[in-house]
Image (cartoon, rainbow, N blue to C red):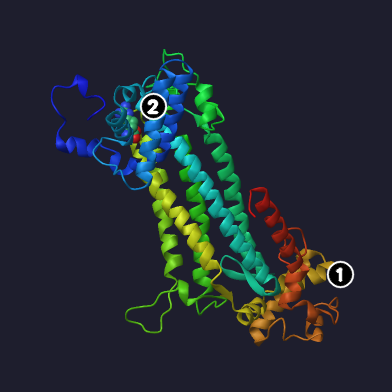
């Protein structure tokens, strides 16, 4: 039965129903829909809008529906949307009292409230999965404290760094995501229930009662905005998109660093795939697929931004389009985070290759210039002298490590015998003790700070 069929003489066309119905996807809201209805019914009873007996009957009926759905005894089918399904089922079970549940309420404030409750739970789950990946990253970073690898700019070897610095950089990105998710959740925790269809209601409702029962921070202050605001879903989609951007960058680095050409890490067989034709192949499909799914999550953000951009106040059916993209984005981002958190623990370092690479291609050149600058040579001159050393090495097939102290002195008398120990990968990395730098000491500090922040956000 449709909730609104009284005004109509003829039934809707079958294809119109199929086009209009949201039950195939909003059935996912059943638990939050019942939670919100329980609060609404209790409030109606408390305010004397319905009798306390009727409120009790409604609440018992709703609870029975919830446990039947939970136990798989009740299939969610045969209605326009989840709100109609629950109400029809309630009326079928308890009769006339059930018909009073929708007093002082509209599906417009109902669906907005359901989505707020659902998205709030989704934020909590997202925070949990983010904490989990930060945990894996700090574990990899701790393991990498003793190793050296080259850091890059422009995808050219730049300076040696402690390998843990790489994983900590991603931990910082996901930490920022946690901060963002926590503040988004706080902003979204406002209750539209009581906004009615658009203009509030003439019944003496008490929105503070429903608000505290549903653990919202406050009721929304404008009913027109209350029923039409989907910013909280957009914000989730943005937060999820940025998480995916961070994941995608991590995937890209993992894909590069596990190639034969780089060879710094290896992914275990458990998270690798093969080729149907090339027997030798070990492919990073999981990371590639995750990089690929990023576009899909961005797409959901763009889709909803476009949906809301031209709709007049207040509720319009366009808003039903807020759900499928959101549900999919939520599923993808959680799945990707959880798989990456596991896969990271299946990535091993190849320390010899990393250490060799950290001294190749003149990675220690900045340290040669810094050596001279610390002896009083103006940095710009020190840079030019080192540039000449690099050019001469290239011309004569030498490296910064194969040059003797006397070779160095042909470029500047300021070079002491200790220059040959300065141009070691580990020495260069460990010299960068500045706050937030790439020395093993700074990396350890970074790990400590990350763990402290994780605890603040509820990690064990
Ligand atoms: N299925 C609808 C949605 O998701 C529920 C609200 C329907 N309200 C209405 N006035 N038709 O937005």
The x, y position of residue 77, in whole percent, is 26, 41
Could you tell me if the residues under marks 2 and 1 are in contact, i.e. CB atoms within 8 Å?
no
Image quadrant where residue 443 sits: bottom right
The x, y position of residue 428, in whole percent, is 74, 72
Instruction: Answer above or below: position of 360 versus 159.
Output: below
Image quadrant where residue 82 sits: top left
Query: From the viewer's perspective, is the residue at label 2 or at label 1 nearer?
Result: 2
Q: CA distance from mark 2 to mark 1?
A: 86 Å
Callout 1: SS: loop
213 vs 115, left or right, is: right
Q: Earlier in the sequence, mark 2 or mark 1?
A: 2
297 vs 146, left or right, is: left
Q: Which residue is at 41% across, 54% downward? A: 295
The x, y position of residue 72, in whole percent, is 33, 48
Does residue 36 appear anywhere in the picture? yes
Q: What residue sits right under mark 2 in the picture?
A: 57
Q: What residue sits right under mark 1 in the picture?
A: 375
Q: Which residue is at 71% across, 65% downward? A: 438
């Amino acid at each position: 039965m449709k909730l609104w069929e009284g005004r109509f003489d003829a039934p809707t066309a079958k294809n119109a129903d199929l086009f209009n119905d949201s039950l195939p996807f909003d059935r996912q809201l059943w638990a939050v829909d019942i939670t919100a209805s329980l609060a609404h019914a209790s409030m109606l009873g408390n305010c004397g809008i319905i009798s306390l007996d009727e409120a009790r009957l409604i609440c018992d009926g709703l609870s029975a529906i919830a446990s039947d759905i939970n136990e798989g005894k009740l299939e969610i089918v045969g209605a326009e949307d989840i709100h109609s399904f629950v109400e029809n089922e309630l009326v079928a079970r308890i009769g006339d009292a059930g018909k009073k549940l929708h007093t002082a309420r509209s599906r417009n404030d109902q669906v907005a409230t359901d989505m707020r409750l659902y998205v709030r739970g989704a934020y909590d789950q997202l925070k949990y999965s983010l904490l989990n990946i930060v945990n894996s990253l700090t574990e990899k970073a701790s393991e990498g404290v003793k190793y050296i690898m080259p850091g890059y700019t422009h995808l050219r070897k730049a300076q040696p760094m402690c390998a843990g610095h790489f994983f900590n950089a991603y931990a910082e990105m996901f930490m920022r995501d946690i901060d963002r998710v926590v503040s988004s959740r706080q902003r979204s925790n406002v209750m539209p229930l009581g906004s009615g269809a658009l203009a509030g209601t003439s019944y003496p409702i008490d929105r503070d009662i429903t608000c505290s029962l549903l653990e919202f921070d406050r009721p929304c202050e404008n009913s027109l905005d209350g029923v039409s605001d989907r910013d909280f879903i957009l914000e989730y989609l943005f937060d999820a998109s940025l998480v995916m951007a961070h994941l995608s960058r991590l995937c890209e680095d993992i894909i590069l660093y596990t190639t034969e050409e780089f060879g710094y890490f290896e992914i275990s067989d458990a998270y690798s795939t093969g080729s149907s034709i090339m027997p030798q192949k070990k492919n990073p499909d999981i990371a590639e697929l995750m990089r690929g799914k990023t576009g899909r999550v961005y797409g959901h953000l763009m889709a909803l931004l476009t949906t809301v951009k031209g709709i007049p106040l207040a509720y319009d059916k366009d808003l039903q389009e807020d759900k499928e993209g959101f549900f999919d984005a939520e599923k993808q981002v959680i799945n990707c985070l959880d798989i990456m958190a596991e896969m990271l623990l299946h990535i091993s370092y190849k320390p010899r290759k990393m250490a060799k690479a950290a001294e190749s291609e003149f990675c220690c050149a900045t340290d040669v210039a810094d050596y001279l600058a610390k002896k009083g040579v103006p940095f710009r001159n020190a840079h030019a002298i080192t540039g000449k050393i690099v050019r001469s090495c290239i011309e004569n097939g030498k490296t910064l490590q194969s040059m003797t102290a006397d070779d160095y002195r042909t470029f500047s008398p300021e070079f002491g015998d200790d220059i040959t120990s300065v141009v070691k990968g580990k020495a260069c990395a460990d010299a960068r003790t500045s706050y937030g730098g790439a020395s093993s000491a700074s990396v350890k500090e970074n790990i400590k700070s990350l763990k402290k922040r994780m605890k603040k956000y509820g990690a064990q």
